[in-house]
Image (spheres, grey):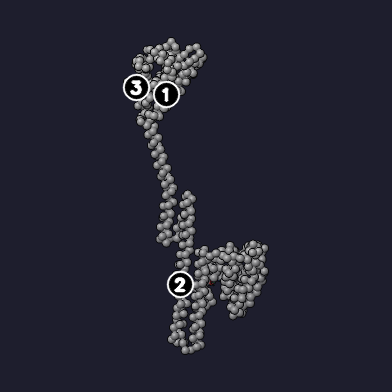
């Protein structure tokens, strides 16, 4: 009630003002229509007031009442220390209004024990004056209060309901992705790298999710490499170590004094050590490539010269097998990582040599296709069975598991080549017929960078 009262009083005063002008219009109108009367009646009825207007002679010319029993016009009131009933003695009221217009006063009603407002005003017209009185309670009546309170209650219940629903929906929206991510993080903690943090949430959570996905991806790759390493330690590292140990013991116990035997045994140890060295180099190279921790140092370089350098490196091996090498090379400058591309050519050519018979032919062709350069390494060796072709690019994949280690077979050469070529966005592949030979190739955008050349 205390909350409503000030608002109510302010509203009352505004209402009185508006009603007084409506009634004044009505009184002063030359021609009053039924609609005018109805409109003013509605205004009074809907606004908890009683209105009365007198002419100069004290004759009632307008009256409208929505207060009923509460209306003060038929009750004794005290105005300017004079007690009288307005309806019975309108002239007294008119006298007061003549001296004091507008009149606005508060009075208390003995019937309802509430503050009432009495407003009066003299309306001056051309021919005569009129006197308008409006009476209204200044405190809301009980039914009105309870109506308002009920309204407030409904509104409050609805508002609380809506805010509860909103709070629930929003908290679900905010917390659900976090809860989901926590579950995925638990999976990750248990070593399950299938964990996926993808969400459809607001951007900060999405960014966090994609960072975590990246981290999971990297962890997964490192984990795969770790598994590979462990799996290969037993075979690829342990076997040469066993050999080295066995031959060292043989030198110590048996061949130490026999220079020929001792040298044979030492050669085996040297070969095994070379193999281990190669394996460790390849493994670290591949792990760097595959975990994405490598940056290409691209520059313009002469691909033909690069091929010639690799041929030079492997010429001894080719001589040993009496291999004939045919080359069709073109002068071309490309923009790529020279060291890494020479590693790819080295791996292709050394594989061709490894898998070729003695006295056979190997060809290296460069085909210049305007924007691209294609390099083919063709051998006429053992070839590769069709069903295993897709796997040869996988790390540690060896067709012949017992392939002689002394020829540097680590099962990593093609995996390294693949990683390097993919880092260069190159196309690459193999065509092979079992028993007839293979053709390994790559195609690289020339991407020749004039800027660098000018520098
Ligand atoms: P490795 O170090 O064993 O040569 P790679 O990754 O270079 O490992 O090659 C994987 C497998 O692909 C090899 O074990 C080999 O059997 C096969 N391979 C690669 N190049 C050739 C080729 N030119 N001819 C026949 N087989 C090949």
Label 3 and label 2: CA atoms lie apart by 104 Å
| Residue 115 higher or lower than 287, as above or below | above
Which residue has dot 1 on it?
47
Residue 297 lies left or right of residue 368; in this view the side is left
Q: Does residue 5 appear in this view?
A: yes
Q: Locate residue 277, reporting x and y percent.
A: 50, 75
Name the residue at 58% across, 78% down: 317
Contact? badges 3 and 1 (CB < 8 Å): no
Q: Earlier in the sequence, mark 1 or mark 2?
A: 1
The numbered dot on residue 203 is none
Q: Quadrant of the N terminus?
A: top left
What residue would you read off at disc 2?
233
- Are there few (<14), some (14-19), or many (20+) residues within 10 Å of tag 1? some
Residue at 41% across / 25% down in the picture? 12
Q: In the image, what residue occupies the spot 39% across and 36% down?
A: 156
Quadrant housing residue 14: top left
Q: Quadrant of the C terminus?
A: bottom right
Please give the residue where the numbered disc 3 appears in the rendered image: 108
């Amino acid at each position: 009630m205390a909350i409503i009262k000030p608002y109510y009083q302010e509203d009352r005063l505004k209402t009185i003002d508006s009603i007084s002008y409506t009634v004044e219009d009505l009184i002063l109108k030359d021609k009053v229509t039924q609609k005018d009367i109805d409109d003013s009646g509605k205004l009074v009825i809907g606004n908890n007031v009683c209105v009365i207007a007198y002419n100069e002679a004290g004759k009632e010319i307008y009256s409208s009442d929505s207060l009923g029993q509460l209306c003060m016009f038929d009750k004794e009131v005290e105005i300017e220390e004079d007690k009288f009933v307005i309806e019975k003695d309108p002239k007294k009221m008119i006298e007061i209004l003549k001296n004091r217009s507008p009149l606005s006063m508060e009075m208390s009603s003995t019937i309802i024990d509430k503050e009432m407002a009495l407003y009066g005003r003299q309306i001056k017209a051309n021919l005569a004056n009129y006197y308008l009185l409006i009476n209204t309670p200044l405190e809301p009546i009980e039914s009105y209060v309870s109506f308002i309170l009920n309204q407030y209650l409904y509104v409050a219940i609805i508002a609380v309901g809506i805010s509860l629903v909103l709070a629930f929906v929003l908290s679900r929206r905010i917390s659900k992705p976090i809860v989901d991510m926590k579950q995925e993080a638990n999976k990750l903690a248990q070593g399950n790298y299938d964990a996926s943090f993808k969400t459809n949430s607001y951007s900060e959570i999405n960014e966090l999710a994609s960072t975590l996905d990246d981290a999971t991806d990297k962890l997964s790759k490192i984990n795969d490499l770790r598994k590979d390493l462990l799996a290969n330690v037993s075979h690829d590292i342990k076997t040469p170590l066993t050999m080295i140990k066995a031959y060292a013991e043989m030198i110590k116990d048996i061949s130490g004094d026999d220079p020929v035997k001792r040298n044979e045994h030492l050669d085996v140890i040297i070969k095994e050590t070379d193999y281990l060295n190669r394996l460790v180099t390849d493994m670290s190279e591949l792990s760097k490539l595959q975990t994405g921790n490598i940056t290409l140092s691209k520059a313009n370089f002469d691909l033909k010269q690069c091929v010639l350098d690799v041929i030079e490196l492997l010429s001894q091996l080719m001589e040993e097998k009496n291999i004939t090498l045919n080359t069709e090379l073109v002068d071309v400058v490309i923009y790529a990582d020279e060291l890494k591309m020479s590693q790819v050519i080295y791996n292709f050519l050394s594989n061709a040599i490894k898998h070729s018979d003695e006295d056979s032919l190997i060809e290296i062709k460069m085909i210049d296709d305007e924007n691209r350069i294609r390099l083919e390494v063709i051998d006429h060796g053992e070839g590769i069975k069709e069903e295993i072709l897709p796997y040869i690019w996988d790390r540690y994949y060896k067709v012949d598991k017992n392939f002689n280690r002394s020829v540097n077979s680590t099962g990593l050469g093609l995996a390294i080549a693949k990683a390097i070529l993919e880092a260069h966005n190159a196309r690459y592949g193999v065509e092979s017929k079992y028993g007839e030979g293979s053709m390994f190739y790559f195609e690289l955008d020339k991407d020749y960078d004039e800027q660098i050349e000018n520098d």
